Amino acid sequence: MEWVLPSEVIIITRTDLLKYILTCNPKTKRDPNIEKYIDQIKSQYPVVEKVETMFKEFHALLMGKDETKLDEYLGKYGASEIEFFCNGIKRDITPVKNAISLSVSSGFVEGNNNKFKVLKRIVYGRSGLVNLEKKCKLAFLPKNQDFSLSALL
């Protein structure tokens, strides 16, 4: 059964709403439908206001230079709906405080490490050179007259 809605009905998905709320860059274009109805959405669903407040406070904390505000944030929201998130930050408190207070970041290095790992998995697979050899043979040998798939397996 397919849903048919009147043309004047505007559908705002959770994904679009989250994207709108979590956008901090003023240069990023925001959804005009959500912009028009955000006050109504927040009054009807108070959790939207709460999520936006928690996120914006955390974003301001990370972009600022005062690492002591992290402890205030964890105290304020440690027993709320984001308790699991706060506990994760508490486990890694030193690196998070360093990210706040220091101007250097390891993001570039971590990004390159992840890219290298993905490439390695694509080329080598998870079982090493044996898998690489089979992939190469499958790519190049079928053009050969003597190719036998059963011999490869």
Image: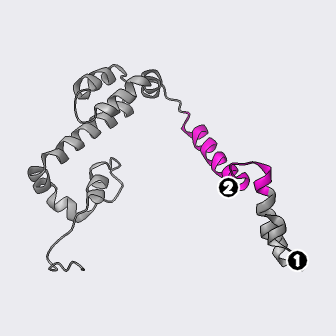
Pair 2/1: label in front: 1
Task: Decide: is 133 above or below 116.
Answer: below
Determine contact: label 2, label 1, CB under 8 Å: no
| Magenta residue check for 128 | yes
Q: Which residue is mark 2?
A: 122
- Residue 144 bears which disc, if any? 1
Q: On the picture, is 9 further left or further right than 69?
A: left
Task: Decide: is 74 above or below 57.
Answer: above
Q: On the picture, is 70 further left or further right than 35?
A: right
- Image coloring type: one colour
How many numbered marks does the figure carry? 2
| Magenta residue check for 7 | no
Q: Nearer the viewer, residue 41 or 99?
A: 41
Over which residues does the magenta segment extend? 106-132
What residue is drawn where x is 22% and y is 32%? 80
What residue is drawn where x is 33% and y is 29%? 86
Task: Decide: is 34 above or below 56.
Answer: below
